[in-house]
């Protein structure tokens, strides 16, 4: 069921979380308006019995609390990293206190939306997408075994999605005390859509189809619901116990203060055009000077001829 992301009676977006074909929904999501900006968190838990659900819920809670308690002058990226590391330690500690929860863990995606920019942070294979005019502007890169192979160009992303090892992740909260969190700062434009989602949501179909569904011209609540329905339909038709699926979608209504960096290809094109312009100017100057020199020589020859003709005329007289 699609639930509005509402803060102070303002709807920022929507969340849809479904149990899928599992016995329990181990995904969790949360939102909070903080001094640093609007924070959205989506986690995908893992672990026997109730471990996954506890891990994902604890992660969401700790991340929201840590960012909410931060000073307004705090660095947003560093605060988000600190929040996720705090959640990691809390999950490890909780696992030590209960034999049923030992080994539990969770992935995490977090988006901190500020007037300056959008700060993304993730661990594991849950994803954050930024879409603009039907195109992918940004996407987090999975911390998984198959995506390491994609990095090395051993397999394609589509082969990674279909691989039997696609669920083998290399990073998660609750596993090691030392946790590497991947963070990015992104500019955004009015109309951009951000999607935070677990692998049960994004992995159901080829990315091209996934982006097409989420880029439809419709209200974002309808878009999220219809996409989730498609994912569930694919899961049911597969005949397997398909995964929990959770996604949050937001559409921004203004431009960020941080502006887009000029693409390298555009920079190269500008340099080439500048060189061509300078070359054209130099060529024109050269041609102008050359023509001026020719005219001066012609004038000198004409004047000399005229003088010689005049002298000859005077002599004859």
Image: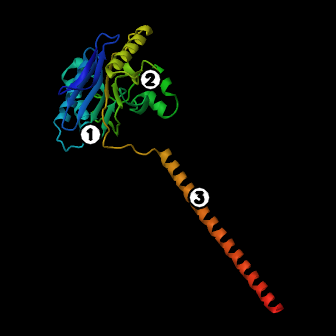
Of residues 246 and 59, which is closer to you in this image?
246
Any part of residue 55 in sight: no
Q: Do the residues labelled 1 and 3 touch (CB within 8 Å)?
A: no
Dot 1: element: loop
Instruction: Tell me residue 196's x, y (percent).
Output: 33, 26
Q: Residue at x 49, y 24 (%)?
A: 158
Q: Locate residue 2 relative to residue 288 in the image: left or right.
A: left
Q: Mark 2 points at which residue?
A: 212
Dot 2: element: helix
Q: Residue at x 80, y 87 (%)?
A: 313
Of residues 159 and 257, which is closer to you in this image?
257
**Viewport quadrant of the C terminus:** bottom right
Instruction: Tell me residue 161's x, y (percent).
Output: 46, 22
Q: Is residue 313 above or below residue 192?
A: below
Instruction: Tell me residue 286's x, y (percent).
Output: 62, 66
Chain-order first, disc 2 or disc 3: 2
Q: Which residue is drawn at 49% across and 46% down?
A: 266
Q: Which residue is drawn at 48% across and 27% down?
A: 157
Q: Rounded to the nearest whole Å, what is the CA distance between mark 2 and mark 3?
A: 45 Å
Outermost residue to the right: 316
Chain-order first, disc 1 or disc 3: 1
Chain-order first, disc 1 or disc 2: 1
Instruction: Tell me residue 260's x, y (percent).
Output: 38, 43
Q: Mark 3 points at which residue?
A: 280
Q: Mark 1 points at which residue?
A: 115
Dot 3: element: helix
């Amino acid at each position: 069921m699609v639930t509005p992301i509402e803060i102070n009676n303002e709807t920022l977006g929507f969340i849809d979380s479904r149990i899928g074909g599992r016995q329990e929904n181990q995904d969790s999501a949360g939102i909070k308006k903080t001094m640093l900006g609007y924070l959205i968190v989506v986690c995908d838990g893992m672990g026997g019995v109730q471990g996954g659900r506890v891990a994902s819920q604890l992660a969401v809670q700790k991340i929201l609390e840590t960012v909410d308690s931060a000073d307004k002058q705090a660095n947003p990226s560093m605060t988000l990293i600190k929040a996720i590391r705090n959640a990691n330690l809390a999950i490890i500690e909780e696992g030590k206190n209960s034999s049923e929860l030992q080994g539990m863990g969770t992935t995490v995606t977090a988006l901190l939306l500020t007037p300056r920019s959008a700060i993304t942070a993730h661990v594991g294979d849950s994803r954050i997408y930024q879409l603009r005019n039907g195109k992918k502007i940004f996407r987090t890169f999975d911390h998984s075994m198959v995506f390491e192979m994609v990095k090395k160009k051993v397999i394609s992303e589509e082969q990674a999605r279909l691989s039997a090892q696609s669920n083998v992740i290399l990073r998660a909260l609750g596993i090691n005390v030392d946790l590497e969190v991947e963070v990015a700062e992104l500019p955004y434009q009015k109309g951009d859509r951000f999607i935070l989602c677990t692998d049960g949501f994004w992995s159901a179909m080829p990315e091209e189809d996934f982006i097409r569904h989420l880029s439809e011209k419709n209200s974002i609540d309808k878009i999220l619901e219809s996409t989730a329905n498609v994912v569930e339909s694919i899961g049911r038709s597969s005949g397997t116990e398909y995964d929990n699926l959770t996604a949050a979608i937001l559409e921004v209504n203004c431009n960020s203060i941080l502006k887009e960096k000029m693409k390298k290809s555009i920079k190269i094109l500008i340099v080439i055009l500048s060189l061509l312009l300078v070359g054209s100017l130099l060529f024109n100057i050269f041609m102008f000077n050359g023509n001026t020199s020719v005219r001066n020589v012609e004038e000198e020859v004409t004047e000399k001829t005229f003088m010689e003709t005049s002298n000859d005329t005077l002599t004859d007289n």
